[in-house]
Image (spheres, rainbow, N blue to C red):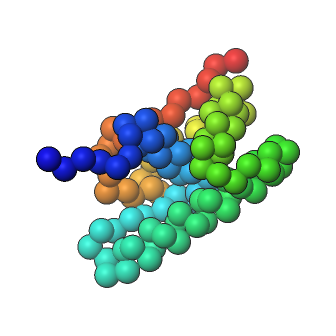
Amino acid sequence: MWQSTISKQQKSDAKLLVAFMKLFLDGGFELDTTAPDYRDRDLGLGKRAEEAVLSFLSECKTTSRGAGNVLKHLRSLHRSGILNAKIERYQRLIQTAAIKDPAPGYTQDVLEGISE
């Protein structure tokens, strides 16, 4: 039987990190799986999001660059409510169709703002 080389926890962490990274794509994005350069566009979006996340974290005096540590810091910032404005902006972009993502709808809006 085929076995996955990554654990369920690693897969869950990766999905959550992608959800956090989407918050940092200002102006929305469009992923068209039928486009011939889909993979290049997807990689470009990923690099743009990564740069934005690392820039934001450096403004917060965090120098982490590894996925696990970045996720840990983003979770902490989320719990403290610092990401609320980005979450609200992302939700507005989804509602106005500025974000076109072929992923299922229930995976689009997994982060909620934290009430203070």
Can you name the residue that lies furthest to the front here?
1
Q: Position of residue 65 (x, y in %)?
A: 69, 54
Question: Would you place residue 51 above or below residue 60 in this image?
Answer: below
| Tally of numbered discs | 0
Q: Position of residue 44 (x, y in %)?
A: 53, 72
Q: In this image, 102 relative to 10: left or right?
A: left
Residue 21 visible in the current orientation: yes
Quadrant hosting residue 89: top right
Residue at image coords 38%, 46%: 6
At 50% from the left and 49% from the top, the residue drawn is: 18
Q: Residue at x 74, y 49 (%)?
A: 64
68 or 116: nearer the viewer: 68
Q: Say if residue 23 shows up in the picture.
A: no
Quadrant of the snapshot with the C terminus:
top right
Question: In the drawing, does residue 26 fall left or right of residue 80?
Answer: left
**55 lies left or right of 36:** right
- In this view, the residue farthest toward the left is 1
Q: Is residue 56 above or below residue 16?
A: below
The furthest residue to the top: 116
**Viewer-nearest residue: 29 or 20:** 20
The spot of residue 30 in percent (x, y) is 42, 64
Quarter where residue 54 is shown:
bottom right
Instruction: Please give the name of the residue rendered at 24% of the width and 47% of the height, measured from the top-left corner.
Output: 3
